[in-house]
Amino acid sequence: VKYPLPLSKLIGWLQKLPGVGFKTAERFAFDLLSWPSTELAALHTALAEIQQIIEPCPVCGSLKEKQTLQKCFGCDAEGRDGRLLCVVASPRDVYALEETRSFRGLYHVLGSLVSPLEETIPPPEAIDTLLLRLTLSPVAEVILAFDSTLEGDATALYVHDFLKQRPLKVSRIAFGIPLGSHFQFVDGGTLARALLGRHHM
Ligand SMILES: [Zn+2]
């Protein structure tokens, strides 16, 4: 089947999304064809804005809106416990943990994980930023909240290596998170228990 070129291109782009194969992308593309032009324009604007308006929080690396806020919601919130710092891989993990409503400390986004298979580590700046933040703030406990996967385990050990000389308690969430799971897919209750049941490294 030969679709008009713009339609084929759109299907190609949609297939870049996680979990979207050709058939699903095709269905989405045909649906979009029937959208009124006002809605397509709104989608177009929304896509442009995710780059124009969102930037990393200068403190924790999570997401914030440019101009409107100095820091992200997590860093800015009242009543947070500055002695607890939860290190996660991506901004999305911050939102997953916030949804559990069981963590009142601060967050730090590492940005990437160690990949033993691809033999990659997070960029040195990512570790430097974390260490600098720990030096400048009254953090007493670092909670490593990475996926329960090969990458998550390797990253926890890697980060722990940089922290073990410091007068800090380092713990890792583990209990309740099934082995091999990405915590985006773990329900809030399980994630909350994993936080509570964190163990010291
Ligand atoms: Zn922040």
Image (cartoon, rainbow, N blue to C red):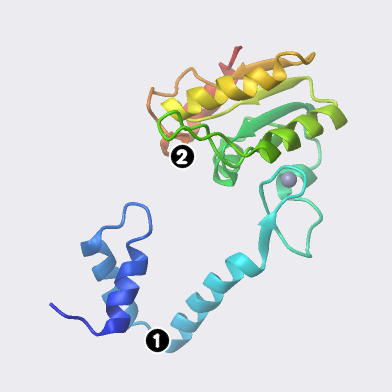
Q: Quadrant of the C terminus?
A: top right
Is 70 placed above or below 12 here? above
Q: Residue pushed farthest bottom? A: 37
At label 1, counting other C-alpha atoms closer than 10 Å, the crowd grade (few under 14, some 14-19, many 20 or more) is few
The quarter holding residue 67 reads: bottom right
Under mark 2, the amino acid is: Gln
Provide the residue designation for mark 2. Answer: 184
* Quadrant field for ligand 1: top right
Label ID, residue 66: none
Under mark 1, the amino acid is: Pro
Q: Position of residue 127 (x, y in %)?
A: 69, 33
Q: Is residue 155 left or right of residue 83?
A: left
The mark nearer the N terminus, 1 or 2, is 1
Is 45 placed above or below 15 here? below
At label 2, counting other C-alpha atoms closer than 10 Å, the crowd grade (few under 14, some 14-19, many 20 or more) is some
Q: Position of residue 72 (x, y in %)?
A: 73, 50
What residue appears at the point 57 percent right and 28 percent down from the top-left corner? 145
Name the secondary structure under disc 1: loop
Name the secondary structure under disc 2: helix
Which residue is more in the foreground, 32 or 25?
A: 25
State yes or no: Cβ of the residue under disc 2 lies below 8 Å from any atom of ligand 1.
no
Provide the residue designation for mark 1. Answer: 36
Q: Residue pushed farthest left? A: 1
What residue appears at the point 79 percent right and 28 percent down from the top-left corner? 134
Circles 1 and 2 in contact, beta carbons < 8 Å = no
Q: Position of residue 36 (x, y in %)?
A: 39, 86
Q: Is residue 123 left or right of residue 26?
A: right
What residue appears at the point 79 percent right and 46 percent down from the top-left corner? 76
Q: Position of residue 27 (x, y in %)?
A: 25, 69
The quarter holding residue 116 reads: top left
| Mark in the foreground, 1 or 2 | 2
Q: Is residue 95 left or right of residue 169?
A: left
